[in-house]
């Protein structure tokens, strides 16, 4: 293919799919920039030119409190090339140690980018590795996410991405407020009011079906949280001391209740929107539909959604538990102890989220039924 034919072919593609071409160019440009963003950092960054394991210790004993754990330790000889700061271009050879499990140490290989540090005098001979640089991969995944969502859904994808980043920003602000001393339960109560309104109104517009979905979300949250509060108040006392990552003097019950409030919010909104929008559209296209048939159609939709959403919750919590379970097993905590002490909190969140999904279906159907009755009465 000649250069002229190639140009003509590319022009034809651009004329047919201008949006796709522009998005593709932006993606390629952003990936190139993100893979070479070392100049944006003040902290020294280096690329691993070569890495060779030169020594391995027979065992390393760690005091586990009850039984020592045997683990191999390795030493690497690594050649680095500095990529930024005034030392850019210099090559340095360092030694680095890592353990077989690589829980708190890492093995480096050729091509890795790492953060390095020097002593107060800045001598190259004092260089040591402080950690691996992973941000480029995270940014590339983000760029791919935006590219695919815009490619598949167009303008609607831009709206979805906007609401997603807005919710992330609100959540970050809420964490900052908690760090400054605001009550965690008050913050979570605000979030469960703000998230549905922002997400659904911006994504779906100011329509009757949107307001029905928001109302269904709030009613489901109210009913299920009352059920949870009743179960906690009159059920067996929960030992919150076994919550993970809790240190210091905190109100553990309020922290757990806040996590419960937010646990199934996303799936509640999804189920509510799916049912209310579908039934609202059904009423508009079939004005004479009987109430009995409308309820039956809603139940059939609920059956289709129910299993999928519950499994989404299940696999989400399983993914979150896998690293924790492996680390605890590695530290000789028995699986029975993990199941008895730590996993019940995740099971509780999963079951509560499942109950919320089940409760959303009849509530959304009831609101749609009220809408059809009022429509006919008018």
Image (cartoon, grey):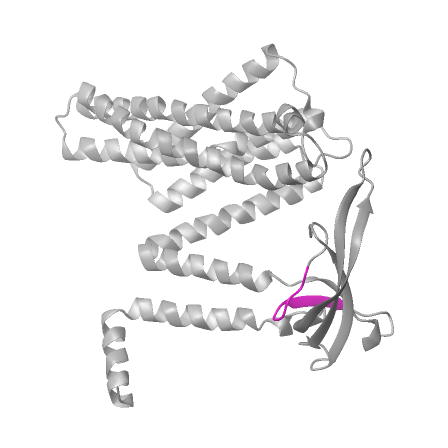
Residue projecting furthest to the left:
288
At horizontal 55% and vertical 49% (from top left) the residue drawn is 169
- Stretch of the chain drawn in magenta: 107-116
Q: Which image quarter: residue 299? A: top left
Left or right of 118? Residue 242 is left
Q: From the viewer's side, name the closer residue of 157 and 326.
A: 326
Image position of 74 with respect to 12: above or below? above
Residue at 48% over, 69% down: 30
Place of residue 173 in the rendered image (x, y in percent of width and height, measured from the top left): 60, 46
Name the residue located 44 percent from the left edge and 37 percent from the top edge: 196
Query: Which x, y percent locates residue 136?
Result: 56, 64
Q: Is residue 123 magenta?
A: no
Choose between 142 and 162: the one closer to the eye. 142
Q: Quadrant of the N terminus?
A: bottom left
368 lies left or right of 84: left
Name above or below for residue 168 compared with residue 245.
below
Q: Using the rendered view, name the quadrant where residue 51 is placed.
A: bottom right
Q: Is residue 234 left or right of residue 76?
A: left
- Is residue 168 at all visible to an observer of this figure? yes
- Residue 116: x percent and y percent? 74, 68
Residue 212 appears anywhere in the view: no
Is 108 part of what is drawn in magenta?
A: yes
Secondary structure mostly seen in magenta is loop
Residue at the limit of the structure toward the right, as seen here: 121
């Amino acid at each position: 293919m000649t250069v002229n034919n190639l140009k003509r072919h590319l022009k034809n593609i651009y004329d047919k799919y201008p949006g796709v071409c522009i998005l593709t160019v932006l993606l390629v440009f952003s990936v190139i920039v993100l893979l070479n963003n070392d100049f944006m950092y003040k902290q020294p960054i280096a690329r691993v030119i070569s890495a060779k394991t030169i020594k391995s210790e027979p065992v390393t004993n760690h005091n586990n409190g009850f039984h020592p754990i045997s683990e191999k330790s390795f030493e690497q000889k690594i050649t680095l090339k500095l990529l930024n700061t005034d030392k850019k271009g210099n090559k340095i050879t360092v030694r680095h140690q890592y353990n077989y499990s690589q829980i708190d140490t890492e093995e480096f290989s050729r091509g890795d980018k790492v953060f390095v540090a020097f002593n107060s005098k800045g001598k190259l001979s004092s260089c040591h590795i402080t950690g691996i640089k992973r941000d480029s991969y995270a940014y590339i995944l983000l760029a791919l996410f935006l590219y695919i969502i815009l490619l598949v859904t167009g303008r609607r994808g831009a709206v979805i991405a906007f609401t997603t980043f807005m919710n992330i920003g609100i959540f970050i602000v809420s964490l900052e407020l908690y760090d400054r001393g605001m009550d965690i339960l008050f913050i979570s109560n605000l979030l469960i009011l703000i998230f549905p309104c922002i997400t659904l109104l911006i994504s779906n517009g100011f329509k009757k079906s949107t307001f029905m979905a928001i109302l269904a979300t709030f009613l489901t949250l109210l009913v299920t949280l009352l059920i949870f509060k009743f179960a906690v108040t009159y059920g067996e006392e929960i030992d919150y001391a076994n919550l993970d990552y809790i240190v210091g003097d905190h109100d553990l019950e309020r922290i757990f209740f806040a996590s419960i409030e937010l646990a199934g919010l996303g799936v509640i909104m999804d189920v509510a929107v799916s049912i209310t929008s579908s039934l609202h559209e059904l009423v508009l296209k079939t004005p004479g539909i009987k109430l009995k048939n409308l309820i039956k159609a809603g139940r059939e939709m609920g059956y289709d959604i129910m299993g999928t959403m519950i499994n989404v919750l299940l696999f989400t919590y399983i993914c979150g538990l896998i690293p924790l379970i492996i680390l605890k097993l590695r530290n000789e905590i028995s699986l029975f102890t993990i199941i008895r002490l730590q996993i019940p909190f995740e099971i509780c969140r999963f079951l509560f989220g499942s109950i919320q999904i089940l409760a959303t279906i009849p509530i959304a159907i009831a609101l749609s039924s009220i809408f059809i009755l009022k429509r006919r009465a008018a």
